[in-house]
Amino acid sequence: MKKMIVTILAAAVILLGVNMAMFNTTAQNAQDHHLWLLHTLLPDSGEFTLLTEYFEDPNIEHVHKAENGYVIDTVTQGYAGEIRMCIGVNNDGKVTGLVVTDMSETYGLGREALTDVDFLKQFLNSSGTFAVATQGADAFSGATGEAESAEGDTVDVDALTGATVTSKAIVR
């Protein structure tokens, strides 16, 4: 019995040691992936600076500034929970990249926003106000799909089939 307890304790100590040794590697890998993502969303960028000033939009979590634009980390409410995205915007105000990094939307419907290239590419090289090209409001966003900017430069985005609430959340 004593031998079994000693063996279990030894295994626990070994696992704890391995976990602690891997912690720095895991953190470095996450940091490297985030930096790769920043450079992918804002091509031809050099160093990024994390801006720390207050942002009026509560959906903005972080803003990373480079010499040729910004990468904005956002979070918004979707149909089944929060949707986290990173959006690259160049100094001319055009979207250079968009990726959904995390969501809890319904599989086969809203979850398609993670991989539906046709949906996501609608945002590229566009600027202004975005609106989902549907009629009628939904209970989650209050959006009607008829948003207009002051300059009238609304970009209509085709919603994901069966996932209008998710599509509107991403557009927001």
Image (cartoon, helix red, strand yellow):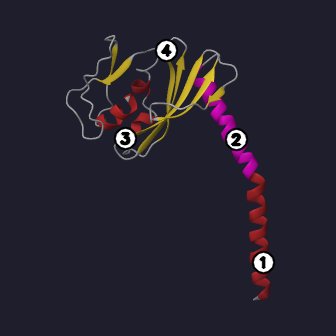
Q: Which residue lies furthest to the left in this view?
A: 136
Measured as percent of width and height from the top left, residue 41 is found at 57, 24
Residue picked out by circle 1? 7
Measured as percent of width and height from the top left, residue 68 is found at 61, 15
Category of crowding for the residue at label 3, using alpha-carbon neighbours closer than 10 angstroms: few (below 14), some (14–19), many (at least 20): many
Q: In this view, does 97 lie to the left or right of 108?
A: right
Residue picked out by circle 2? 29
Please identify, in this view, whether the residue under mark 4 or under mark 3 is nearer the observer: 4
Residue at 75 percent across and 48 percent down: it is 24
Please identify, in this view, whether the residue under mark 4 or under mark 1 is nearer the observer: 4
Quadrant (top left, top right, bottom left, bottom right) of the N terminus: bottom right
Is the C-beta separation of discs 2 and 3 under 8 Å? no
Residue picked out by circle 4? 93
Residue 127 among magenta residues: no
- Characterize the magenta stretch by its predominant secondary structure: helix
Cα–Cα span, label 2 and label 3: 28 Å
Q: Which label's residue is closer to the chain start, 3 or 1?
A: 1
Is the C-beta separation of discs 1 and 2 under 8 Å? no
In the image, residue 17 above or below residue 139 = below
Residue picked out by circle 3? 78
Query: Is 1 in front, or is 136?
Result: 136
Cα–Cα span, label 4 and label 1: 61 Å
Category of crowding for the residue at label 1, using alpha-carbon neighbours closer than 10 angstroms: few (below 14), some (14–19), many (at least 20): few
Measured as percent of width and height from the top left, residue 44 is found at 64, 16
Q: Which label's residue is closer to the chain start, 1 or 2?
A: 1
Which stretch appears magenta? 23-42
Looking at numbered disc 1 in the image, what kind of residue is underneath it?
Thr
